[in-house]
Image: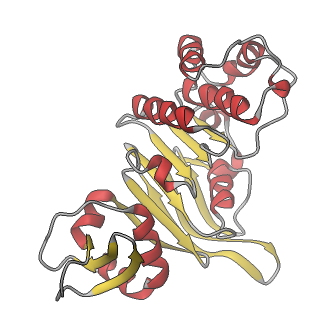
Amino acid sequence: MINLENVSFSYRKGRPLFDDLSLRMPAGHICGLLGKNGAGKTTLLRLMTGLNFAQSGTVTTLDENAALRKPEMLKDIYFLTEEMPVSMFTARKYAKYYAPFYENFSFEQYEEYLHLFEVPSMDDKIHRLSLGQKKKVFISFALATNTRILLMDEPTNGLDIPAKATFRRLLSMAANDERLILISTHQVRDLHSLIDSIVIVEDGQVLLNADNERITRKLCFKVREDITDEPILYCEETLRGDLLVCENIYNVESKLDIELLFNAVMHNKKRIAEIFNH
């Protein structure tokens, strides 16, 4: 669905943000896009939607050159930005004016999502709502577009705990084998139960691009109970004991810890790259 080949991009001459980056993203996943601040996660989403242009290489989205932003692509992709747009419309009028751009938009779903988010009225001006309520309106609209590709940048920022639970429920309902949902986030705990594949970017490169099954086949996540002869890639001291990420040389089943994985990749980039490229 999305394919980046040998992409280079920079905001300032001589300081590339991405250098010869390649990434393939198929349908059927809720993918977490992870990276440190400034790693280029938002820029990567903008490249995928044609809002930024690669200096070299190609970005193909839904079999189209993303930079051309053809209607055939735009009608089937939605990008929910972290910064909420300023809108003088009510939630009802917002859908009336913007829904026609998305041929699979469902007004019924939109109203249902707003109800589940406990947005009190569709007739309040969006710009007068709190940050959390605004976020609920735009998330509801994004999900109701039913586009084949849904990109979300920090969608849980500004949501309270009940709203985050509702968001997870709605996102699980929206996912299917024909759709790619890509979420850039630092709040991995909010989405841990939903994400089924992970992309980690750093230093202009993709350090990891794998689904959860492959990750737990290659790596083992455990609490240190005794001496282990499994090669330790990362260790983190906690009140529960030492949390370990090890090479899974004995094919042990373990539960993926996304935050621990991210820290392990940042700590031991070279060895983890060797493991996943083997």
Residue 223 versus residue 110: which sits nearer the camera? 223
Q: Where on the picture, by quarter, is residue 140?
A: top right
Query: What residue is shown at x 76% (from left), y 19% (from top)?
Result: 94
Nearer to the camera, 249 or 148:
249
Q: Is residue 69 visible?
A: yes
Q: Closest to the observer: 164 or 204?
A: 164
Query: Viewed as shown, does residue 210 lie left or right of 152?
Result: left
Residue at the spot x=49%, y=79% of the render?
266
| Position in image of residue 4 (x %, y %) | 54, 62
Q: Is residue 260 above or below residue 139?
A: below
Q: Position of residue 148 (x, y in %)?
A: 49, 35
Which residue appears at 31% of the width and 61% of the height?
A: 256
Q: Quadrant of residue 169?
A: top left
Quadrant of the drawing holding the C terminus: bottom left
Residue at the image point whose x is 30% and y is 66% from the top: 215
Q: Is residue 25 left or right of residue 137?
A: left
